[in-house]
Image (spheres, rainbow, N blue to C red):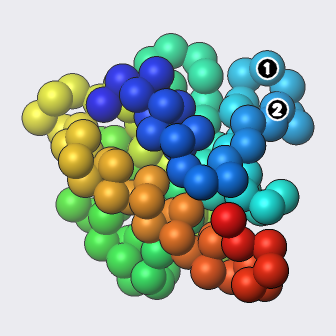
Amino acid sequence: MRLDEVIEHCLGKPGAVETYPFGEHVLVVKVAGKAFAFIGLERPGSVGLKCGASREEAAELRERYPESVGVLDYLGRYGWNRVDLGASPAAAVPGDELRELIDASYAAVRAKLPPARRP
């Protein structure tokens, strides 16, 4: 999946808002003020996502794709992974699976919102 496709998929979520709290090099996509994707805009790019189910799921994903998935700086201990988009095709997370990871991150963040704030 290319960087522009990741951005488009994230911003296509209901209530998704584009923010740049860390400067022009990191796009933070939020829903109701809560981040669900940290997108590194320097080519080839990366995306930090909350692992939907558990820390164990986050660790399993890193084991399955050791060359392209790592712990997200500062948030990794809370179940966030970084997916590098520039990995070789053989080592990269497949596009369909990356879309599912984005969807799971959005759903996990949205689920913790008070019902009145959910889009």
Q: x, y (%) of residue 11? A: 58, 39
* Residue 73 visible to an observer of this rendering: no
Q: Amino acid at mark 1?
A: Glu
What amino acid is at disc 2? Tyr
Residue 24 image label: 1
Is residue 84 in sight in this rendering? yes
Cα separation between marks 1 and 2: 6 Å
Residue in front for this viewpoint, 81 or 104 = 104
Q: Is residue 98 above or below residue 105?
A: above
Tell me the quarter of the picture where residue 80 sits. bottom right
Residue at the limit of the structure toward the left, as seen here: 90
Question: Which of these two is toward me, 77 or 27?
Answer: 27
Count of labels in the image: 2
Going by the image, does 93 lie left or right of 71? left
Q: Quadrant of the N terminus?
A: top left
Q: Are marks 1 and 2 in contact (CB under 8 Å)?
A: yes
Instruction: Indicate the secondary structure of the residue bearing disc 1.
Output: loop
Identify residue for label 2: 20
In the displayed structure, 17 sits above or below 44; it is: below
